[in-house]
Amino acid sequence: MFTHRQQRSSRAPKQHGFTMLEILVTLFLLTMWLLASAGVQSSSLQYTKAAQFRTQAVYLATELAERMQANKTSAVAGTYVHSGGSGTSPKNCVTATCLPDELAAFDVAEWDGRVTAVLPNATVSVTTAGAANPITYTILISWTDRRTDRTYSAGGTSESFSYTATKTIYDSPTL
């Protein structure tokens, strides 16, 4: 028959549900960790997009400043002053030869269109204290960025950003 040793090993140990509780706690902790990771990833993407907008604003302001530098005659005359949203289409200086003032109007119109295409709800302003040699321009680019974690006004969840650059241009007189 059975020996004493064989009888013991054939009996199943009594379960009290402790292992099931451990599994539930582990699943709960794992779920919380995954949700936290998803939140961190979402914030990371949001801040990456905001940084991309700032980088684009710096690039676009620098581009206009370089265009001014290339067209010094018109820039010193104050032709690059712009308050955004020009209603007229300037002469296309890519396909035709332009005078300095026409080139300035073309530069500003093309630049304004690129700013509004790249940045959300963008507005631009190029101002100067007055035409002089040297002349200093102030380039202001503003845009709004969606923020879902903060409410700044009753109108919605957005935050306004702006970038300001200055460019001084000196046109040396020709001898």
Image (spheres, rainbow, N blue to C red):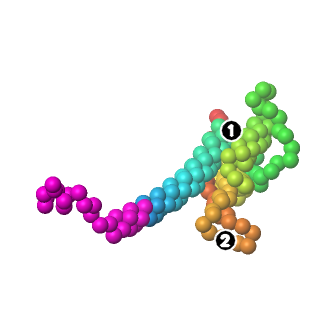
Q: Nearer the viewer, residue 14 or 80?
A: 14
Q: Nearer the viewer, residue 13 or 59?
A: 13
Find residue 156 and report its horizontal and vertical position in percent: 72, 67
Image coordinates for residue 46, horizontal then vertical, percent: 57, 56
Which is nearer the eye, 133 or 83? 83
Could you give the CA–CA distance between mark 2 and mark 1, rounded to whole angstroms?
42 Å
Q: Disc 1 on helix, strand or loop?
A: loop
According to the picture, the residue beneath numbered tag 1 turns out to be 71
Q: Which mark is residue 152?
A: 2
Q: Residue drawn at (73%, 55%), measured in percent from left and top?
A: 121
Asked if the magenta segment contains residue 25, the reply would be yes
Identify which residue is drawn at 80% across, 32% down: 92
Query: Which residues, given as a range, are shown in magenta?
Result: 1-27
x, y percentage for residue 22?
Answer: 36, 65
**In the picture shown, does residue 10 fall above or below 66?**
below
For residue 37: magenta?
no
Q: Main secondary structure of the magenta part?
A: helix
